[in-house]
Image (spheres, grey):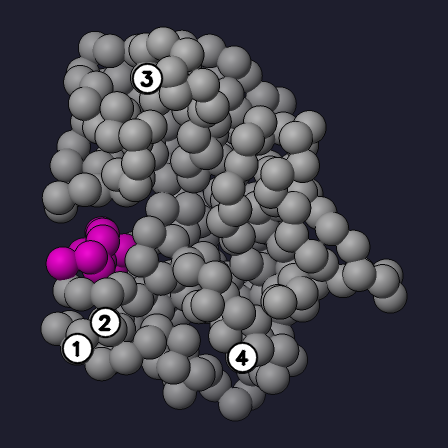
Amino acid sequence: MSFLLDAEITKQERIVPGHFRLSLSSPDIVTAARPGQFLQVRCGSTLDPFLRRPISIHAVDRKKGEVVLFYRVAGRGTSLLAEKRQGNSVSLLGPLGRGFSLPEGKARVAVVSGGIGIAPIYFLLVELAMYGVSADVFLGAATAEQLFFFKEIKGFGYRVEIATDDGSAGYHGLVTDLFAESIPLSNEYAMIYGCGPGGMLRRLAEIIRSAGAPGELSLEERMGCGVGACLSCVCKTSGEGKVQYQRVCTEGPVFPANEVVWT
């Protein structure tokens, strides 16, 4: 179930320059939200900019009834959102889209995140910990400064490996290369999850296919409406023996790794 409502900001926190963590009071959205889903957020106080911005659900606090967003300032809309303060209200539409599927029982999974891809991955990791699922977590970023929430994720009890493009922390190189070197030959993972830049996801899909493991990837595409009407966010997939286009906002943003067609 999705809702269209105004939510009050309870906290706006700058994590590093250009990256913010925003908490909003919205018990209805909290109850309905699942890891991997997103909200369509009206960033300004008027109809300019006209389109809402899709932002992944980063976390929920069920006791407080708060939904948390983690976002990067990338344009006019998110710049306006970053100017809002505690007590201001924000119009939200959601939760929207298909999220991650959770494994059954005390399974073991792998989670691979690159850059701002940690936004929905964090929510997934919180839920996996709640259900007693073990995870090997691979966090990638351009620099050590952008390895977001490492200590918090480590505190969940997961094995966490890190990679940076510039070598300022952990493995010097791409997080997918680190993962490819670390994936067990026995293929013990019940699921491999990923979210990050398109190039990273493409390489991760290749690794998942070679390992013969099930996987799910959260894609990011430019969106207009967020509810499947405008068809601006389609991606190419293969299923049931044929290539087709699916809407990232409704059939996704999470897709089986073996269904995404990379062009």
Which residue corresponds to the image point at 22% horizontal and 53% vertical from the top-left?
148
Q: Please rate how many residues cluster around mark 2, counting C-alpha atoms within 10 Å: few if below 14, some from 14 to 19, many from 20.
A: many
Region in magenta = 145-155
- Identified by mark 3, the residue type is Gly
Mark 4 to mark 3 CA distance (whole Å): 41 Å
Image coords of residue 15 (percent x, y): 15, 42
Residue that badge 3 annotates: 44
- Identified by mark 4, the residue type is Ile
Q: Earlier in the sequence, mark 4 or mark 1?
A: 1
93 horizontally vs 143: left or right = right
Residue 92, picture quadrant: top left
Q: Please rate how many residues cluster around mark 3, counting C-alpha atoms within 10 Å: few if below 14, some from 14 to 19, many from 20.
A: many
Residue that badge 4 annotates: 207
- Identified by mark 1, the residue type is Gly
Q: On residue 167, which mark appears?
A: 1
Q: Is residue 136 magenta?
A: no
Q: In terms of depth relative to the viewer, which is nearer, 206 or 137?
A: 206
Residue 103, picture quadrant: bottom right
Asked if disc 1 and disc 2 are in contact, CB closer than 8 Å, the reply is yes
